[in-house]
């Protein structure tokens, strides 16, 4: 390792060949030989000649075999420097071409080695990536398997839950039917004014007399009372009266007789001066009351002229000639 100035580009040379003739130091690129090519010279590196000196010496060397001894020239003159033969020039040209091609091949080989190294590194990276992906896939597969194993008992639980849902729906339906069933003998009277010390049985008797229904209060009436309401809108209205009869058929006949009157005013049953209208209907459960309200809204939207309740069945009718049952409760 030495440091000097390149004889060609004049830049500092840290490592490069040295000419044995001119003692000049060169960069490998500046003297037309690669570092690998120079190292392949082996022992010939100590006798390496730079291109400039090689060209100079070639022009001074003369092949003495081309000078005939009979020419009469002195031996000294025959051996003196002179122009090289054309054959020698051709050989030097061929040698330079070979060296240039070798240098080009060396560069291409170096580039190939670099590409090969990159390819090998890429293969390693791909192999690592495959390994990582396979590891993750194995982990995901294991987790999926664990989840599937957990889902097996959950499927059984889901089946039990579905069964419970069906049971609850059945119980709710039974409860709704039972709630309406216990009201099958009830009549709900709306619009009867409230007063302190009222006697609702007397009011019911007057209603029966008004519609001409034969009612025996002692044997036909189970009970009669006012009931509370559940929402604020109805709380502002007069509390309805619930009349329970001993017989459902008696209740149906009494309700039909009241409806034939069409218009009943409170003043008709002893409430002097009151023009409030009294309405008699089946005593519906909370669910069926809501259903009746929805039926009335839909009937209005669909152009049905009538919506009412008969024997706890919600009825609708488009006009006087057509009627159909909307829901059976």
Image (cartoon, rainbow, N blue to C red):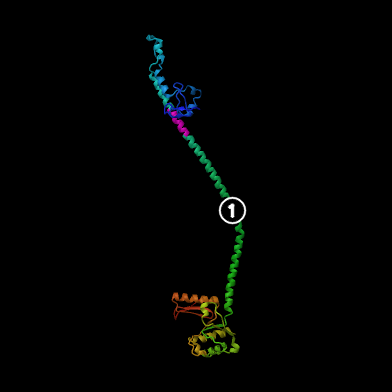
The residue nearer to you, when weighing 249 against 108, is: 108
| Helix, strand or loop under label 1 | helix
Query: Image point 62% across, 59% down: which residue?
Result: 153
Query: Can I make out residue 152 in this image?
Result: yes
State the count of labels. 1
* Residue 20 rendering spot, x and y as whole percentages: 46, 21
* Residue 326 rendering spot, x and y as whole percentages: 50, 76
Displayed quadrant of residue 50? top left
Is 108 magenta? The answer is: yes
Query: Image point 60% across, 63% down: which residue?
Result: 159
Give the dominant element type of the magenta stretch: helix, strand or loop: helix
The residue nearer to you, when weighing 98 against 5, is: 5
> Can you say whether 31 is above or below 122 in the image?
above
Q: Quadrant of the C terminus?
A: bottom right
The residue nearer to you, when weighing 48 against 200, is: 48
**Magenta-highlighted residues:** 100-110
Displayed quadrant of residue 203? bottom right
Query: Image point 49% across, 38% down: which residue?
Result: 118
The residue singled out by tag 1 in the image is 143
Is 293 magenta? The answer is: no
Query: Can I make out residue 28 in this image?
Result: no
Query: Image point 48% across, 36% down: which residue?
Result: 114
* Residue 320 rendering spot, x and y as whole percentages: 44, 81
Displayed quadrant of residue 177? bottom right
Badge 1: residue crowd in 10 Å (few <14, some 14–19, many ≥20) = few
* Residue 10 rendering spot, x and y as whole percentages: 42, 28
Q: Is residue 10 left or right of residue 221?
A: left
> Can you say whether 95 is above or below 173 in the image?
above
């Amino acid at each position: 390792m030495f440091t000097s100035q390149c004889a060609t580009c004049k830049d500092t040379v840290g490592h490069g060949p040295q000419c044995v003739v001119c003692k000049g130091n060169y960069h490998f690129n500046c003297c037309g030989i690669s570092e690998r090519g120079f190292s392949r010279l082996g022992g010939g590196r100590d006798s390496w000649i730079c291109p400039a000196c090689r060209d100079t010496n070639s022009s001074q060397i003369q092949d003495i075999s081309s000078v005939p001894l009979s020419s009469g020239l002195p031996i000294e003159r025959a051996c003196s420097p002179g122009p090289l033969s054309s054959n020698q020039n051709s050989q030097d040209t061929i040698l330079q071409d070979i060296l240039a091609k070798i240098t080009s091949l060396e560069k291409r080989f170096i580039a190939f080695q670099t590409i090969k190294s990159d390819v090998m590194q890429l293969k390693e990276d791909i192999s690592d990536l495959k390994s990582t992906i396979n590891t993750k896939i194995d982990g995901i597969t294991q987790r999926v398997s664990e989840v599937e194993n957990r889902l097996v008992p959950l499927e059984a639980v889901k089946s039990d839950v579905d069964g419970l849902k069906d049971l609850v729906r059945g119980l709710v339906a039974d409860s709704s039917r039972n709630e309406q069933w216990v009201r099958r003998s009830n009549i709900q009277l709306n619009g009867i004014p409230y007063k302190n010390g009222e006697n609702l049985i007397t009011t019911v008797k007057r209603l029966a007399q008004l519609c001409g229904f034969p009612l025996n209060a002692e044997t036909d009436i189970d009970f009669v009372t006012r009931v509370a309401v559940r929402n604020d809108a109805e709380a502002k209205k007069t509390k309805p009266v619930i009349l329970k009869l001993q017989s459902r058929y008696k209740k149906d006949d009494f309700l039909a007789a009241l409806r034939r009157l069409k218009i009943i005013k409170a003043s008709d049953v002893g409430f002097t001066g009151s023009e409030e209208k009294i309405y008699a209907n089946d005593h519906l459960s909370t669910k069926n009351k809501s259903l009746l309200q929805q039926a009335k809204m839909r009937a209005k939207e669909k152009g049905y002229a009538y919506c009412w309740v008969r024997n706890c069945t919600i009825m609708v009718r488009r006009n006087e000639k057509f009627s159909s049952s909307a829901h059976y409760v």
